[in-house]
Image (cartoon, rainbow, N blue to C red):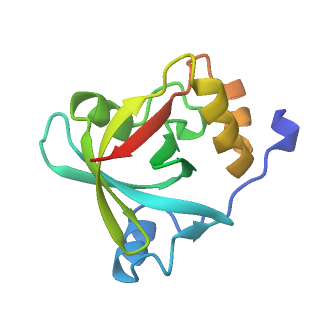
Amino acid sequence: MSENNYTAPDLTLVGADHIAAYRETDGEVGYLWNGVPTLLLTVTGRRSGQPRTSALIFGRDNDDYLIVASMGGAPMRPKWYLNLQAHPAAQIQVRDQHIDVTARTASVDEKPRLWQIMTDIWPNYDVYQARTEREIPVVVLSPT
């Protein structure tokens, strides 16, 4: 997919507003964002030790949840990903379900299959990868 195939998302519900609406409505508002499913990921800050929450597009691979550390193709990794590397125990909220998970980065062998799952959901991930020199990771969240 080229930059010409990029679909600009509707950004009327993002960041803290997305998280607040999702929490207040148990995902009734915010679960679907631009037609794709989202979850809330709460990680432990690697420096602060404080909980940090992000709303992220997700996919499924059997019992596991998949997220992509794309940051829109920025050269740096998202803070939530760095936090997960330091503290892989996290929590997700999917609609009204709160689930404890352990995070890991997909292996080189499994990434192509998992990347395909995620680009089927959000094709812009291919554009994001083309924008950056860094390898964009797929993160596997396994319920504990």
> Toward the viewer: 104 or 50?
104
Q: Residue at x 60, y 66 (%)?
A: 33
Seen in the image, is 110 located left or right of residue 41?
A: right
Res 89 quadrant in image: top left
Q: x%, y% of residue 82?
A: 32, 31
116 up-or-down from 33: above or below: above
Q: Nearer the viewer, residue 55 or 98?
A: 98
Q: Is residue 67 left or right of residue 4?
A: left
Residue occupying the point 45% across, 60% down: 39
Instruction: Please identify the residue farthest to the right as the structure is shown.
Output: 4
- Residue at the (83%, 34%) spot, across then down: 1
* Residue 74, horizontal then vertical, whole percent: 55, 31
State whether residue 39 is above or below residue 130.
below
Total labels: the figure holds 0
Name the residue furthest left. Answer: 49
| 127 to the left or right of 78 | right
